[in-house]
Image (tube, grey):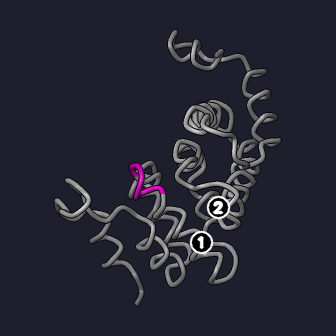
Amino acid sequence: MIIRSDGSNKKASVPEVADAGRALLAAYSFQRTGNHHQREDYELGVIVRASLTGDEGKPIARQLCRGLLAAAASRSVSAFEYDDLMTGLLRVHPDDVLNEQISGDKKAKGGSVGLIGEFARHHTSPMDAVPDATLVAWCDRDPAARYPFAAAIATLYNQKDDENPDGWRDIARTLLLKTPD
């Protein structure tokens, strides 16, 4: 409530609010919570954006991403229930969250692609929170591994509805032109 109030009043929260948010997020565990997941997801996204900016938020962002990937893989939760959380994580620490998504073996990477795909089927993709330049800079650090992964998770075309694409996005062309293979 304090975060929302401060945002509405266009004032910065006191540092203790961010500290409390980081403590809450660090202790968060992914589990079914009944029919309250949409509200909880929204609130998690608000807390992430207000609490995890800066270097002190990076390890918590990575931990939350790992936790969501594991919970979705074990089917403890449905990934699409956490779109606001993932959007917030990608907004505040895109490199760290992308690093978590690409870490692990081929099966783990496939799980990350599936996770982003699940979000995109139910809502807009959290990848839309990552600026194209940020995604390309991340890919350039390991082109052979990252460009194909980025092509699998980025929103490549605008969509009018489920069946009719409305044109390719600029990122699609960039990923095709810059990929080494």
Q: Are marks 2 and 1 in contact (CB under 8 Å)?
A: yes
Q: Secondary structure at mark 2?
A: helix
From the viewer's perspective, tell me whether residue 127 is left or right of residue 86: left
The question of residue 33 being in magenta is answered with no
Q: Outermost residue, bottom direction?
A: 181
Quarter of the picture holding the N terminus? top right
User: Looking at the rendering, in which quadrant would you find the C terminus?
Assistant: bottom left
Question: What percent of the width, then of the height, locates residue 73?
Answer: 66, 67
Residue 126 in the image, given as x and y percentages of width and height: 47, 51
Q: Main secondary structure of the magenta part?
A: helix
| Figure quadrant of residue 68 | bottom right
Residue 43 placed where, x, y %? 61, 31
Residue 147 point in image, percent of width and height: 45, 76
> Which class describes the residues within 10 Å of circle 1: few (<14), some (14-19), or many (20+)?
some
Residue behind mark 2:
72
Q: Nearer the observer, disc 2 or disc 1?
A: 2
Mark 2 and mark 1: span between their CA atoms? 8 Å
Labelled disc at residue 125: none
Residue at x 60%, y 75% (from the top left corner): 109
Q: Residue at x 73, y 56 (%)?
A: 67
Tag count: 2
**Magenta part of the chain:** 119-124
Q: Eyeballing the image, is 103 above or below 98?
A: below
Q: Secondary structure at mark 1?
A: helix
Name the side, left or right, on which 153 lies relative to 67.
Answer: left
Q: Is residue 120 magenta?
A: yes
Q: Which amino acid, mark 2?
A: Ala
**Residue 96 found in image quarter:** bottom right
Nearer to me, 38 or 113: 38
Q: Which mark is residue 111?
A: 1
Question: Residue most toward the front?
Answer: 34
